[in-house]
Amino acid sequence: MNTLAATLLLLHPAQCLRFRRGSFGDLVPIATTMAKNLMNPLSIKVDCFEVAESEGQRIGWGQLRPLGPAAADPDDFDAAPGSRGADDVDAAWDALPDPPTGFASLPWTDEYKAFARGADERRRGRDAASADAPQLWELASVFVLEEHRHRGTG
């Protein structure tokens, strides 16, 4: 997201809309409204929300979610689902350490803590590798209050 959403004004004959990035004060009203309308409020991140306002009142919102890197792997072009080489998959699994078992799998053991640290390091490495790649985004959890629908807000 960028500052364009924070400064964008959209003029509509019926109302003047202002779009801004969501704030912590938006979290409870958005989550409550989503739950009342049978939408899942558990995965929302307020800093990913774009909020539409009219005359200082919140009238709608949408959440931008990252889908992953925008660049496709050229080796996967025209490949049938599940056709990735078995050797690649086997090598990826073989690179993972064996998880602790038995009493060693309890969260307070040194073995478990070492395994968890390794998982965190692999996750950070994966996130760092994909951080530089262009991202695909999805506009999800879009909602406009009932009284403001059919006026060009959504």
Image (tube, rainbow, N blue to C red):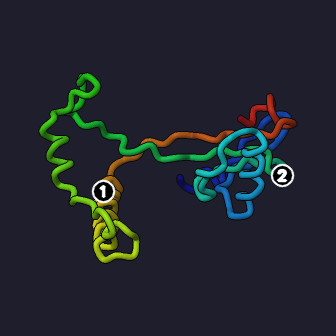
Q: Secondary structure at mark 2?
A: strand
Amino acid type of the residue that numbered disc 2 sits on in the rendered structure: Gln
Query: Which residue is located at x 64 percent, y 41 percent?
Result: 141
- Alpha carbon of mark 2 to alpha carbon of mark 1: how far? 40 Å
Residue appearing at x 66%, y 39% in the figure: 142
Relative vertical location of residue 23 with respect to residue 88 in this rendering, above or below: below
Q: Is residue 20 left or right of residue 149?
A: left
Identify the residue position indicated by label 1 in the image. 126
Q: Is residue 23 left or right of residue 100?
A: right
**What residue do we see at 30% from left, 56% from top?**
126
Percent x, y for residue 150? 80, 28
- Residues packed near mark 2 inside 10 Å, few (<14), some (14 to 19) or many (20 plus): few
- Does residue 110 lie above or below 45 as drawn? below
Amino acid carrying mark 1 in the image:
Arg
The residue under label 2 is 57
Q: What x and y, as percent, mark residue 112? A: 33, 70
Q: Nearer the viewer, residue 19 or 110?
A: 110
Q: Which of the 4 image quarters holds residue 68?
A: top left
Q: Residue furthest left?
A: 87
Label 1: state its secondary structure: helix
Where does the image place residue 38, in percent across and percent down from the top left?
Answer: 72, 39
- x, y (%) of residue 128? 32, 60
